[in-house]
Amino acid sequence: MTCQIDDGTDTFSESGRARDQNDRAGDQNDRARDQNDRAGDQSGRAGDQTQKEPFRRLPGHEYASNYPDPITGDPLQIYPSKVPSDFDSEDDFWKYLDALSRRNNGLPPPRPKPAGNEISPRATPERLPKPASRFKATKSRHLAVRLTEADYELLAELARAHAVRPGTMARMLVVRGVRASAAE
């Protein structure tokens, strides 16, 4: 059996040194490209303030897939929760909390409210309907209300937010409306 004696040269370390030198040269090129990118970003910021940076997901963060952030319009950040110091104002923080609460309760994002001129004025009836003569007002508690599909969906959304059935929510709203009108 013969044994070969090492002559002292380490072929692995020599090839490793050459590889390290190539890596260093590549790193320097990467740094130069990064500096050029930063310079381009800064010059772009000085000229046009209206361009918005594209949304980037941060590692370790969880976002809602189809629920927009009320401030930026990007996907809503669910985890980790944001803190008040992450926002420009306290109102923005409360808008974020409201959106997060609605998302966690399974409610859709709020619809934009129409402006005053977008709402058509309702025609007033020419005369008031006759009261029911068969029953006294105190004993009759039945009220039939017809709603459009959109109004019923809005009622059902409110009912889910208050954890009651849509019929119960309708009764609550009618009673509050009657009492508010009587108070005026």
Image (spheres, rainbow, N blue to C red):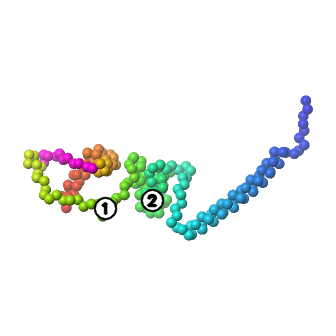
The amino acid sitting under disc 2 is Ile
Residue 84 shows up from this direction: no
Specify the label residue 71 is tagged with.
2
Element class at badge 2: loop
Residue at the left extreme of this rendering: 133
Q: Is residue 145 magenta?
A: yes
Q: CA distance from mark 2 to mark 1?
A: 24 Å
Between 138 and 54, which is closer to the camera in this rendering?
54
The residue at which mark 1 appears reads as 118
The x and y percentages for residue 24 are 75, 55
Query: Which residue is at 46% across, 57% downward?
Result: 73
Residue 71 shows up from this direction: yes
Q: Main secondary structure of the magenta part?
A: loop
Between 83 and 165, which is closer to the camera in this rendering?
165
- Which residues, given as a range, are shown in magenta? 138-148
Between 40 and 88, which is closer to the camera in this rendering?
40
The x and y percentages for residue 169 are 27, 48
Of marks 2 and 1, which one's residue comes earlier in the chain?
A: 2
The amino acid sitting under disc 1 is Glu
Q: Please state if 15 lies on the left or on the right of 132 as rendered.
A: right
